Image: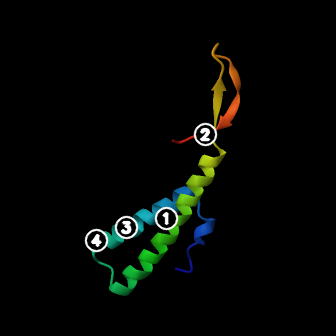
Amino acid sequence: MSDNPAISDLSFEDALKRLETIVHRLESGEASLDESITLYAEGDRLRGQCEARLQAAQARIEKIAVRPDGSAAGVQPFDAG
């Protein structure tokens, strides 16, 4: 798939679309064993790239800290937990 951009160059959305295409192809059962192995490996790299981008985005998200009177007290790191 040399005509495709490198996985690291894909936007999150494009990587996710490619991953969905791969999943559909694998689930269809139409791919040969060799193609399935190649697709699975690409899908695993895409999954890793998407996960890394999500973690990086989450690390940049901040939440607004609010004082008891409702006024903004600044920002704090986002806590997903």
Do callouts 2 and 3 mark residues in contact (Cβ within 8 Å)? no
Asked if residue 53 is positioned above or below residue 30 in the image, the reply reads: above
Say few, some or many: other residues with alpha carbon within 10 Å of mark 3 (under 14 / 14 to 19 / 20 or more): some
Front residue of 47/67: it is 67
Of marks 3 and 1, the one in the foreground: 1
- Residue that label 4 marks: 28
SS for dot 3: helix
Residue at 56%, 80% (x, y): give it: 2
Q: Is 33 situated left or right of 46 in this image?
A: left
Rendered location of residue 31, percent (x, y) = 33, 80
Say few, some or many: other residues with alpha carbon within 10 Å of mark 4 (under 14 / 14 to 19 / 20 or more): few
Amino acid at pointer 2: Phe
Q: Which badge, 2 or 3, is on the more N-terminal residue?
A: 3
Of marks 1 and 2, the one in the foreground: 2
- CA separation, marks 2 and 3? 32 Å
Of marks 2 and 4, the one in the foreground: 2
Asked if residue 24 is positioned above or below residue 60 in the image, the reply reads: below
Amino acid at pointer 4: Ser
- CA separation, marks 3 and 1? 11 Å
Q: Specify the label residue 12 is tagged with.
A: none
